[in-house]
Each structure stands twice: as structure tokens, then as C-alpha cells.
Amino acid sequence: MNNRYKFAFIAILSLTIGMSACKEENKTLNNPKTTQKIVSSKTKPVKKRVAKTVTTKPIVKKATNKYFLISASFKSKSNAEKMKNTLQKDGYDSQIIVASNNFYRVSYKGFSNRVEAFKELKRARTTEGREDVWLHIKH
């Protein structure tokens, strides 16, 4: 009987130590403050690959102009070209718009916004030399 008690005592003691060792190990693993990364001195350092960041400019689509301030209209294309070149030399963004009646309309300013176009038309008509300016709406 004496051997049975010793055997039972040793078995219980072994289980208790084994269980407490597992619990302590779980506590260590769950606690991030005590978890440390161990690096062997035989291992080579790992080179980290850094992805190259490519900066791209956002693509901004320019709104197409639908409203144009017309300074003159010509039957002759050559006259329209002369007027356009003169306006461009003066710093305007001049364009030639061919109308349905085959006239060449020479614009000196274009707008994508209706409200801005009408404000500029009103202002232009009060400017000396621009009293005959009119607005062409492209469809």
C-alpha cells in the first residue's frame, strides 16, 4: 500500500506541475509585453523589400466649352483666320466655329458654365469696342 500512495502522489504531483507549466506558458504568450522575438546569431538578417511608391498626378478632365463669345462672323475662311490670329496675338483663346450656314464665327473666349458666360457677355457689352459681342451656344 505504501507503494500505491507513493505512485499516486508522484502521478498527482507530475500532473499538477505539468498543468501549471502549461498555464504559465499561455500567460506568457498572451501577454504582448513579455513576448520577445529571439534571433539566432547564425541566421542572416532578412532584407526587407520596400515597394516603390509612384506618385501620379490626378487626371483632371477639362470641361468642354459650350458657350462662346463671338467677336465677328465671316463668309470667308481666310478673313476668319486673320481675325483669330490677331486675337491670339492679343492673348485671347480664339477659335473658329463653323456655323450651319457656312459662316465662320470667331470667338475670343469660351465657357463651360452658362452663368459665367452670360455674366461675361453682359460685362463685354459695356466695354468700348465690344458692344456687338454675342453669345454662341454650341449644341
Image (tube, rainbow, N blue to C red):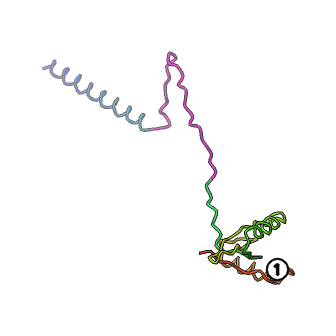
* Quadrant of the rendering where the C terminus is positioned: bottom right
Residue 94: image location, x then y, percent: 75, 67
The residue sitting at 19% across, 24% down in the picture is 8
* Quadrant of the rendering where the N terminus is positioned: top left
- 88 relative to 31, above or below: below
Please give the range of residues in magenta. Answer: 31-57
Q: Nearer the viewer, residue 24 or 108?
A: 108
- 132 relative to 82, above or below: below
Residue farthest toward the right in the current orientation of the protein: 128
Q: Magenta stretch mostly in which secondary structure?
A: loop
Mark 1 belongs to which amino acid?
Arg
The residue sitting at 83% across, 63% down in the picture is 89
> What crowding class fits label 1: few (fewer than 14 Cα within 10 Å), some (14-19), or many (20 or more)?
some
Residue at the disc numbered 1 = 130
Occupied quadrant, residue 72: bottom right
Label 1, secondary structure: give it. Answer: loop
Residue 3: image location, x then y, percent: 16, 18
**Residue 71 painted magenta:** no
**Residue 50 painted magenta:** yes
- 107 relative to 58, above or below: below
Residue farthest toward the left in the current orientation of the protein: 1
Residue farthest toward the top in the current orientation of the protein: 42
Q: Nearer the viewer, residue 102 or 61?
A: 102
Q: Nearer the viewer, residue 19 or 26?
A: 26
Occupied quadrant, residue 93: bottom right
Q: Is residue 84 left or right of residue 17?
A: right
Residue 117: image location, x then y, percent: 70, 77
